[in-house]
Amino acid sequence: MRRRIGVRALGAQVARYGSVSPDRLLREPVCRRIATAAVVGICAVGWTVPAAAYRPFDGTDAAVVDVGELEIEFQPAGFVHTTSTTALAGPNAVFNYGFAGRWELVLQAAAQAFPEGAGPTNVPNGAFLKYVVQPGVLQDKSGPSVATEFGALFPDIGGSGAAGFSWTGIVSQRWNWGTVHFNVAANRTPDQHGDVFVDAIIEGPNKWTVRPVMEIYADRIFDVSQTYSALVGAIWQVNDKLSFDVGLRYALVNGRPVNELRAGLTFGFPLNLGRPMNSESASAVPLGRR
């Protein structure tokens, strides 16, 4: 799970200031704490495992992390610009934990939603389970990889509403020239609107250290909004323990233009305190997502 749901009010921090410069927001204590956490996380890569999460996209891929490993996708800050305001996008984080073969627990949260009129936020608050239905190319086997992800959507921090629900079907296929991921999702938003999301991600060759990426999607929140989005960017695979990403996104939300800058990193570490997996477990679980 990555993106969802809907046109919502600004979070508590942005609401305190209204439309203000991003520089002022970045001076807030919460951002200093997030920046400190990022430095600590980067310094911890000596213990990390292969970073393979799926930033900077709204969709995801048909793979899960290894059993006993925690993978963190983190965006310290980004910016979203509408016809009426420029606001901070983030900080946000996604935590992926492999708790069983083919299974992954996904927990994600953002400090605030996008400003009203900016369309769906890409990291809503939620808790999900992801399962690889059919191992394939992303699991070092032949054929496409197929996965499903489902779980609860929660209201924005400081917002109102009940829990919603999300279900996503995911298919991934890889060739020498690149990789394609296709997502279809049906959701019930926390403000109880139906939502349909169709998404395609295209990556450059997997062996490239810096590979270009793009994503296009259409999202319909019934009685609320219609969003068409396109993103171009790059993923820099520093090594098998750390990756950085950047993306520029242009969208039309109910016919109005929205621009967004995303930048972040992905890293992971074993929750078994570095104990090596036995050979049987290692052979049963794919080595990361890439």
Image (spheres, helix red, strand yellow):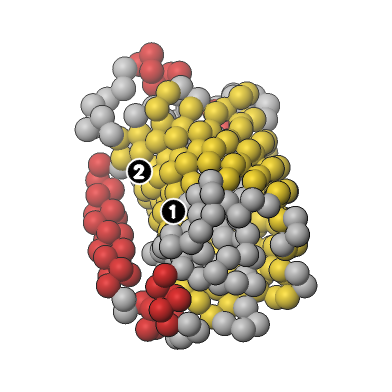
Residue drawn where x is 70% and y is 75% of the image: 257
- How much space separates mark 2 and mark 1, taking CA atoms? 17 Å
Asked whether the residues under the numbered discs 2 and 1 touch, taking CB atoms below 8 Å apart as contact, a structural biologist would say no
- Residue 165 horizontal/vertical position (percent): 59, 42
Q: Amino acid at mark 1?
A: Ala
The quadrant of the picture occupied by the N terminus is: top right
- Relative placement, left or right, of 60 versus 20 is right
Q: Which mark is residue 13?
A: none
Q: How far across and how far down the image is residue 80, in percent?
A: 55, 73
Q: Nearer the viewer, residue 2 or 162?
A: 162
Q: Is residue 147 shown above or below 55?
A: above
Name the residue located 55 percent from the left edge and 28 percent from the top edge. 131
Tell me where residue 285 sits by quadrant. Answer: top left
Residue 78 in view of the camera: no
- Assess disc 2: are there few (<14), some (14-19) or many (≥20) residues with their C-alpha within 10 Å of its C-alpha: many
Q: Which residue is mark 2?
A: 268
SS at circle 1: strand
- Residue found farthest to the top: 280
Q: Camera-side residue: 119 or 260?
A: 119
Residue at (53% x, 41% y) in the render: 152
**Disc nearer the start of the sequence (2/1):** 1
Q: Is residue 169 visible?
A: yes
Residue 4 against residue 30 in the figure, above or below: above
Q: Position of residue 217 (x, y in %)?
A: 71, 55
Instruction: Specify the farthest residue to the front.
Output: 161
Q: Nearer the viewer, mark 2 or mark 1?
A: 1
In the rendered view, would you say 175 is above or below 109? above
The residue where tag 1 is placed is 109
Going by the numbered disc 2, the residue's amino acid type is Gly
Q: Is residue 122 left or right of residue 237?
A: right
Describe residue 196's horizontal placement relative to residue 142 as left or right: right
Name the residue nearer the viewer: 115 or 137: 115
